[in-house]
Image (cartoon, rainbow, N blue to C red):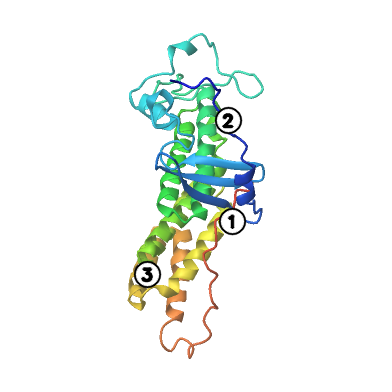
């Protein structure tokens, strides 16, 4: 016989949880917890409480339009050559931030003058990318490099999609300020994956590829002169310099060959990188001290810096 007494309400106060896990402003406070369903989830302690995220799919666990994320949904729509939903047909023009009409960009998904994305959809993609940003920053703290590579690669796809199919100049360019940071974090995570497998050469090659990706990004942005002093490039060069002495001496010949190829193709940024690696490598050879003092200890690969231009993706 069922009881007539009212059920005891569940206590929703989390003060004890917060007390047991104090917030430390000097570091990223992240941990994995196992839910009642046996699934592990990611938690981040912030000053006002706790953020909880799924480890797979969207961090908030949602499946918009039945897709893993909005990115996959819009990528599929563009690939099918479809336009935004017919519900937007009533809109007569796309306006920029001050309300003035702006020319549509040619979009592969909708043909010239018919962008494959709306401004609202670009904004939704940006908001979704911030979720993935919060997750990969926390995963960096937990040294889950494989998932960091996954989420940063995914956010780079968001930048590409908006740049190619956004309807306004703002939609196409607003995320580009974060491209260098995302490339740097992805490169660091790739290198550390290789180092975990004791593959120093592969780690150095990953860093070289990341530096080349940065060079292309700055060149495409029309700012190649900013690359040398960019904090993202400095961070990757410091990580590479720390790893170069760990390469076998037998790699010197290969580095020289790659240096000659870089000079022939006028890729002077890569040539400078390879030249520095070769000098560090040669300084470790027997007799190097007799030939003159080599460079001092290189700084270790420190944690990725947080973006200074605002929060995001």
Which mark identifies residue 231?
1
Q: How many marks?
A: 3
Asked if residue 4 shows in the view, the reply is yes
Which mark identifies residue 170?
2
Which mark identifies residue 255?
3
The location of residue 138, given as percent across then percent down, is 52, 49
**First along the sequence among labels 1 and 3:** 1
Asked which quadrant contains residue 63, the reply is: top left
Asked which quadrant contains residue 173, the reply is: top right
Give the answer, above or below, for where 7 lies relative to 23: above
Indicate which label's residue lies in the foreground, 1 or 3.
Answer: 1
Secondary element at image label 2 = helix
The location of residue 26, given as percent across then percent down, is 65, 56
Q: CA distance from mark 1 to mark 2?
A: 25 Å
Secondary element at image label 1 = helix
Please give the name of the residue rendered at 56% of the width and 23% of the height, measured from the top-left corner. Answer: 6
**First along the sequence among labels 2 and 3:** 2
Secondary element at image label 3 = helix
Asked which quadrant contains residue 69, the reply is: top left
Nearest the viewer among 44 and 232 is 44
Nearest the viewer among 240 and 265 is 240
């Amino acid at each position: 016989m069922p009881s007539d007494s009212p059920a005891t309400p569940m206590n929703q106060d989390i003060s004890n949880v917060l007390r047991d896990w104090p917030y430390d402003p000097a570091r990223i406070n992240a941990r994995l917890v196992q839910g009642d369903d046996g699934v592990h989830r990611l938690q981040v302690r912030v000053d006002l409480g706790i953020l909880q995220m799924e480890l797979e799919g969207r961090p908030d666990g949602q499946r918009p339009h039945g897709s893993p994320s909005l990115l996959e949904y819009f990528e599929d729509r563009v690939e099918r050559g479809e336009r935004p939903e017919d519900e937007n047909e009533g809109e007569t023009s796309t306006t920029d931030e001050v309300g003035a009409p702006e020319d549509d960009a040619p979009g592969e998904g909708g043909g010239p003058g018919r962008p494959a994305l709306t401004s609202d959809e670009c904004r939704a993609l940006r908001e979704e990318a911030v979720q993935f940003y919060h997750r990969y920053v926390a995963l960096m703290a937990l040294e889950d490099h494989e998932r960091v590579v996954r989420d940063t690669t995914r956010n780079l796809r968001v930048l590409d999609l908006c740049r190619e199919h956004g309807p306004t100049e703002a939609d196409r360019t607003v995320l580009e300020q974060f491209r260098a940071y995302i490339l740097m974090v992805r490169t660091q995570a790739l290198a550390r994956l290789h180092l975990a497998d004791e593959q120093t050469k592969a780690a150095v090659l990953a860093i070289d590829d990341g530096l080349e990706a940065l060079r292309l990004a700055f060149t495409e942005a029309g700012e190649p002169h900013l690359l040398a002093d960019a904090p993202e490039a400095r961070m990757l060069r410091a990580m590479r310099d720390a790893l170069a002495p760990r390469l076998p001496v037998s790699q010197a010949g290969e580095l020289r060959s790659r240096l000659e190829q870089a000079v022939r193709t006028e890729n002077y940024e890569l040539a400078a990188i390879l030249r520095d690696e070769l000098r560090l490598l040669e300084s470790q050879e027997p007799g190097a001290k007799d030939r003159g003092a080599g460079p001092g200890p290189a700084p270790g690969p420190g944690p990725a810096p947080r973006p200074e231009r605002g929060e995001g993706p």
